[in-house]
Image (spheres, rainbow, N blue to C red):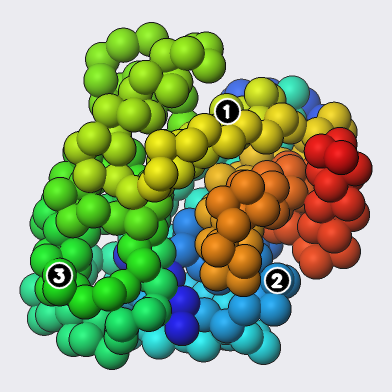
Amino acid sequence: MIYTVTLNPSIDYVVHLDRLVEGITNRTSGEEYYFGGKGINVSHVLAELDLDSTALGFVAGFTGEAIEKGTARERIKTDFIHLNSGVSRINVKIKSETETEINGQGPHIDDEALEQLMLKTDAIADGDTLIISGSIPKTMPDDVYERILERLKGRSIRIVVDATKKLLVNSLKYRPFMIKPNRQEISEIFGVEVNDEETTLTYARELKRMGAMNVLVSLGGDGAMLLDEFGKVHLEGALKGRVLNTVGSGDSMVAGFVAGYIRTNDYAYALRLGSACGNATAFLDGLATREKIAELMARFETKNQ
């Protein structure tokens, strides 16, 4: 089984404007709703790839009820903890001349609720995969990822961490199977400018030395780089296409990589499928669909012949 953790899920309200003008009433030219959070995004793309997953996390209030109903679908089991107060957050994504995001805070998560999450992780067994991604709500201790990983220590669980700064660095001592920083996040971790292939590889090797088995680096318009557990470097370029959406592209890459590796144990194939999923989300208004993934995977296969 694959488990995803989303500590602060959301309803993402996406509004399209021809032009955003401050100080007046703006009228949308289109709008969509998505039930999101990084782990939930991963679960949705895994479902498109015909893999089952269980989504863990916290929900509260009427928005939490909507998130739970909107996430539950064939191949996604929801096992959220229901908080007694507050409401799950709504994030506003404004797409106009530029993209602007306004993210809500989310509900208060107390120690009792956190302990319920820890108990749920006890069901994760040897051979399972756990994907931890996203930020930690302000009301939670900043070592919550470490607490989860410490509780799982000693089990043969494939752990994937997609987080930033200290959250990522502090997970490395648990030797996660894969981490997925981007260049900006690597720059923030090491206090250097990482903007080319050589420096990206240098610091990917440092992250591997610090504990990560595999380091997958998303390179934006330049594609992706994987430094695998054997020290081999894999590169995959980005496909050309009109970028409609950047939200969830990295989560889609994680889902594709995990699915590809589970099915083949082949890192080159896993990187290719991850890249196809990330590009598929970028080229759609929402998350990657199986049809778009298949289309782009065929383009990658042709390009690599």
Considering the image in quadrants, where does the C terminus appear? top right
Considering only vertical position in the picture, is 18 above or below 178? above
Q: Nearer the viewer, residue 21 or 31?
A: 31
Kindly identify the amino acid type of the residue bearing the numbered disc 2: Leu
Q: Nearer the viewer, residue 263 or 254?
A: 263
Determine if residue 26 is in view.
no
Front label number (1 vs 3): 3
Using the image, tell me which numbered label, if any, was put on residue 49.
2
Q: Give the spatial CA distance, label 1 vs label 3.
A: 31 Å
Mark 1: which secondary structure?
Answer: loop
Q: Are marks 2 and 1 in contact (CB under 8 Å)?
A: no
- The x, y position of residue 278, in whole percent, is 67, 47
Kindly identify the amino acid type of the residue bearing the numbered disc 3: Lys
Determine if residue 212 is in view.
yes
Mark 3: which secondary structure?
Answer: loop
Considering only vertical position in the picture, is 162 above or below 165? below
Mark 2: which secondary structure?
Answer: loop
Give the mark nearer the N terminus: 2 vs 1. Answer: 2
Give the mark nearer the N terminus: 3 vs 2. Answer: 2
Q: Nearer the viewer, residue 43 or 304?
A: 304
- The x, y position of residue 71, in whole percent, is 58, 78
Considering only vertical position in the picture, is 98 above or below 209? above
Where residue 211 sits, quadrant-wise, is: top left
Q: Find disc 3 in the rendering and name its residue.
A: 153
Where residue 115 sits, quadrant-wise, is: bottom left
Question: In this rendering, would 84 be left or right of 55?
Answer: left
Front label number (3 vs 2): 3
Q: Residue at x 30, y 38 (%)?
A: 208
